[in-house]
Amino acid sequence: DKPLKDEYDVVIIGSGPGGGTLAHALKDTGKSILLVERGDFLPQEPDNWNSRVVLEKQKYANSEEWVAADGTSYQPNMYYYVGGMTKLYAGTLFRFRQEDFQESRHQDGISPVWPVQYDEFEPYYTQAEQLYFVHGKEGEDPTEPSRSVAFPYPPAPLVPELEEFKKRMSKVGLHPFAVPQGLALFAGGRCLYCGYCDSHPCQVLAKGDPELCCIRPAMRKPEVTLLTKAKAVKLLTDPSGSNVVAVEIEREGQTYKIQAGTFVVSGGAVNTPVLLLRSANEHHPNGLGNSSGLVGANYMRHVSTVVLAQNPAGVKLPQNHFWKTIGFNDYYLNGTSDWPYPLGTVQVTGNYHESMPIFLPDSLDSSEEKREELAAQMLPLFLLSEDLPRSNNRVTLTSDGRISVAYQANNVNSHKKFIEVVIDKLKQADYGLITYKTFLDVKQGGGYHHCGTARFGNDPATSVLDRYCKVHDLENLYIVDACFFPSAPALNPVLTIVANALRVGDYLKCKI
């Protein structure tokens, strides 16, 4: 409980994988750091592992409503907590592939080149894997990028049902591999290897997330202060408009103005551009950093599908152990002989337990009891395809100041082909009833893996940030979250956000 001061050396807004990791990266500089979080600590309680409460009732979704392009409001199932959205993520921590940093052609257009290539990220991926307890195994995934060192921990163990899945997928010509997972699954760690990692909070605080890995260790430093339940509403600039001098914060009915020498915004791909747009002034009439008109533009999220495949034995699968350990990327880079475009990644999801019947189609007209019985026999798979940047997919503000997200999915035909290919392989492997549910509408939970709304680049006319994620238009404002992505590679993005925060942290150590 450190007292709040009027001025700090560095203010970081947002405690997700970008902001939380950056606070950790700067904790030994001796500089005073304020980490501002809109939410509070997510409580560790029995409901953390109640799928009906977490998934169906969305107990922990505590964001405001968003407005869709048609003017209707909806709850996007977003989470404001210390650690950000990772409090309910699956702990899946992939490196992007070397090809992901380069230009690639998709059926629906071009995925652009990044201004920084894989080789510059590689040492920070290594640090990120060590920091976030990543378990994995090199040499199994044909798309894996080069590595300077092995994974810090061995792959998470496979349960018998997934050993069987791995064998069957191998027999039909695929290359299953150990999905890299961040878990405190080691001597002295608290991971119970339970069935509630994916889309649930961790009741024992054993998931590799920013709260456990970065924020709690950083808070032990006297120079680092965490301010919870504090909403940043506006950034204020000096009279020249070239520097941010203060952030206006609302907390428990009071308004504070906190000054700093350096400001970092890490509110996520929706709330970060919203803060910049709300901070418009006479020098920045369209919002801070928006001389290019790209703040909020190129909003991306993955095109995704849950596929359920009935296990060949037609028996109930165990509900109480860890599932997200197997994936395959055979169609990630090259597609198929009749579809020469990248398709995406396949990963076994965490077990959704009693909520899995919601993924069964309505056409399976049977009693609730029968639906639950059938769902318990299903192996759940998660398919992700790349979303391409589109300027009209955009985060803006309504006339009354509400968050508006206009989004239309793209690369959809490739995703449909992907579903077809995966289902064909499951049939070849003798899985029974196969069904799926695709998420294309932005209102369907708000989407997965939001990114891209303040892309980095070398040209201020076509990007918001420079190569070190400093806003082109201001001298002391940085953005360190998924906003900086120029593209949305079809892999889970958290490790790249973490690696970039470490990279930017090294740069800032010489600046602050």
Image (cartoon, rainbow, N blue to C red):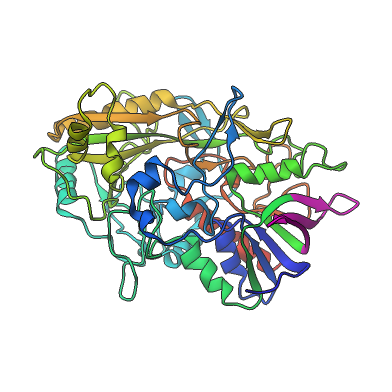
Q: Identify which residue is drawn at 29% across, 59% down.
A: 137
Q: Residue 53's x, y, as percent? A: 38, 46
Relative side of 123 to 260, left or right: left
Of residues 489 and 287, which is closer to you in this image?
Answer: 287
Q: Quadrant of residue 411?
A: top left
**Residue 323 appears anywhere in the view:** yes
Quadrant occupied by the N terminus: bottom right
Left or right: residue 234 versus residue 484 is right
Q: Nearer the viewer, residue 130 or 219?
A: 219
Most frequent secondary structure within the magenta stretch: strand
Region rendered in magenta: 234-260
Q: Please determine whether, in this image, residue 325 is positioned above or below residue 100.
A: below
Q: Position of residue 30 (x, y in %)?
A: 67, 77
Residue 217 place in picture, x, y as percent: 52, 73
Q: Could you tell me which residue is drawn at 61 percent across and 55 percent down?
A: 14
Residue 502 in sight here: no
Which residue corresponds to the image point at 33% horizontal and 51% vertical from the top-left? 50
Q: Nearer the viewer, residue 124 or 281?
A: 281
* Rendered view: 66 above or below 87: above
Compared across the picture, whether 99 is left or right of 325 comes to: right
